[in-house]
Image: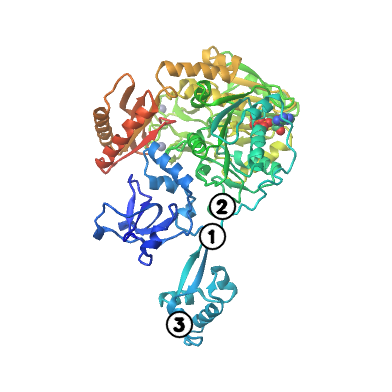
Amino acid sequence: MHQFAVLRLALPTPLRRLFDYLPPESMSVAEALSVPPGVRVLVPFGRRGLLVGVLVEVACETPVAHDKLKAATQVLDALPILSAASLQLCEWTANYYQHALGEVIQAALPVKLRKGEPAATQVAVWEHKTEGKGLGITALKRSPKQQAIHQFLLANQQLKPSEIASLGLSVSALKCLAEKGLVTKRLLAPRPSTPSTPRHGAVLRESPQQPNDEQAAALAAIRYHEFNPYLLEGVTGSGKTEVYLHAIGRTLQAGRQALVLVPEIGLAPQTLARFARRFCVPIAELHSSVSEGERAKNWLAAANGEARIVIGTRLSLFTPLPELGIIVVDEEHDSSFKQNDGLRYSARDLAIVRARLAQVPLLLGSATPSLETLHNALSGRYQHLHLVQRAGDAQPPSIRLLDMRLERVEAGLAQTSLDAVEACLLRGEQAMVFINRRGFAPALLCHHCGWSANCRRCDARLTLHATPYHLHCHHCDAQAAVPKTCPGCHSHSLAPIGQGTERAEALLSSRLPNATILRVDQDSMQRKTAMAELQQQIHSGAPCLLVGTQMLAKGHHFPRVTLVVIVDADQGLLSGDFRGPERMGQLITQVAGRAGRETLAGEVLLQTYRPDHPLLQRLVHEGYANFSRQILAERQAVNLPPYWAMAVLRAESKQPQQALDFLREALEQARLIAPPSPHLQYLGPIPALMEKRNEVYRYQLQLKSHTKPQLQQLLKPLIEYLESHPPARSCRWSLDVDPQEFN
Ligand code: ADP
Ligand code: ZN
Ligand code: ZN
């Protein structure tokens, strides 16, 4: 028999280590040894007061001096809140992204559970302590409220918190009894997870579409009881979702659960409705517009097997699913799968890890696969499934480049575009104008002296907004009044330059006074119900014109949209980010995919000042599939991802010096750990694409290696070193493995 037990915990701190605590004083060594990993434990943590940690293991020894060990305050769960599989995924994540396990777990848990709130499946009851049991029925006469509770417990043994009010008992009296040591609260083990829904019964609510030949071939390729990643590359409207639904149907019928990851922004409600129409099993939603309470509830429903399908954005990746049978990542190229602060992880990449740990198939679907995924498919690591035809009768849209140098242009819109919009609405159809900027104009400039309205806190221009009329920084949220005269030369020569959605909307409504125009951007969609209202209006089928940002580019299904105008089609060619052309190709293809989804034919107009650019030409004439293979070859030629692995070490400080010093020291250390070679390159410190943001100077060190394992071998000791040699207080740093942005 062991004399001693320590609880080894992951705590929500940035320190990359576990913390040892003695069991709570009321707990015997034997009891402590049987506490299962994955339960939450409340512990004192210096000045931060009480923290909620998660038990990783119970050990019989500790390197900590015994008189330094503190006792845990309370074990919060009777059964693990994170299964062994979930803990394993968290550990993998912590290792790969060089992040503290405690913070990974923190990110994985819904907020309510992070805070130590009881897991809903666990029931707490009030009971007598031994002293309380010994009291006679007439004790506590001086306090009738306490006596009522005492008598109830003598007769019933247990009191559920939910009964207190209905029995007319008093909470404060209960607390007094607890303080006197007469009663205590005890957690009951949750009911064993008995998946209540039919494991082999009916899962379908409606009969599915008969798969066409391409869909049938894709479905036949999927093997269900082993790990295999599949890239389902299918043009928009080719029936990818239908393939997911079939594969999920099979998984459900086999008594297993499905995890479906979807991008952020408006997509989830639509997808959810389609799943709910198809399946009669409980579906749990997990995304940012689900309330915290609901999120914890859905998470637990998935964890105990009640929910058979989980649909959510990246944060649902970690949801425990004891009977996981398939993972689907829809629109796998979407940038919202990457988290760009705190724990910088890619839910798409972790979905692969999760599928491998669980030995289940993973379906990655997209019309415009990321180059990372495409590379994996082309090199044979993923199985490549194709849908090249649109399902049903829909035809692919015709795409035309509009040479802006030859066009009459007003507020950024070509005359040809305006005419096409007008004709489309007259035919009784719907049109979309896509501009990747919100606000009225991205700059306010003086034509006389060249002054421009800049943000004082950022290296950025202020955006002019029309309603309300003001200047706004989209990077730090600073706001300013619009000057009446030029602050530089006092002339009246200030003019808005470029166009945003508001300006396009204004021009279009003056040109088409009878048209219904709907603006779709972050500003107009702020109300929670705005997106749903918009969709209703669009689905009514009445002619209307949508003017919006990339919110329009996501996978909506708008059957009556037959014309799409893309205002600045060539923006991505100018980007300082090596992913600029890739994103341009994805965006244009996705937006174009909104046109002519059903029986009506679609047309896409691309406004550009570089109609001859080879990449644009290739995209328009040969399609994304061809275009993406071309830029993939270019990446290979210059040692960029996905051929090379990359990480970025970022530092920022109020003065440039501290951040630069820190990165220089990091570089020196990196060189000591692994000298640069043809297979390992260091670049920096260099300024971020936006060097100053919100009064902070930002720099980065890029670390590139031929292989991921080689990069990992460098990162681990480097981060350990940096953690033990922290920079000056005014400097903050972070590591981004597989970075997606450089601004
Ligand atoms: P994607 O996800 O590739 O954009 P969807 O699955 O949403 O494509 O399918 C596009 C449209 O085609 C939808 O209206 C869908 O109901 C329809 N569809 C898909 N597969 C079939 C099929 N096999 N037979 C008939 N219609 C189909
Ligand atoms: Zn001026
Ligand atoms: Zn700013």
Residue located beneath label 1 in the image:
190
Mark 3–mark 2 Cα distance, whole angstroms, equals 39 Å
Where on the picture, by quarter, is residue 365?
Answer: top right
Separation of residues labelled 2 and 1 (CA atoms) = 10 Å
In which image quadrant can residue 460 be found?
top left
Answer with left or right where residue 664 lies relative to residue 458.
Answer: left
- Give amino acid for label 1: Pro
Q: Secondary structure at mark 1?
A: loop
Q: Earlier in the sequence, mark 2 or mark 1?
A: 1
Alpha carbon of mark 3 to alpha carbon of mark 1: how far?
29 Å
Pointer 2 and pointer 1: residues touching (CB < 8 Å)? Answer: yes
Report whether the residue tagged 1 is closer than 8 Å to ligand 1. Answer: no
Number of numbered tags placed on the structure image: 3
Residue 205, percent from left and from top: 73, 44
- 350 in relation to 304, above or below: above
Is residue 472 rendered to the left or right of residue 273? left
Q: Residue at x 36, y 25 (%)?
A: 704
> In terms of depth relative to the viewer, which is nearer, 491 or 37?
37
Residue 689 is situated, as x and y percent measured from the top left of the image, at 39, 28
Disc 3 target residue = 134
Marks 1 and 3: in contact by CB < 8 Å?
no
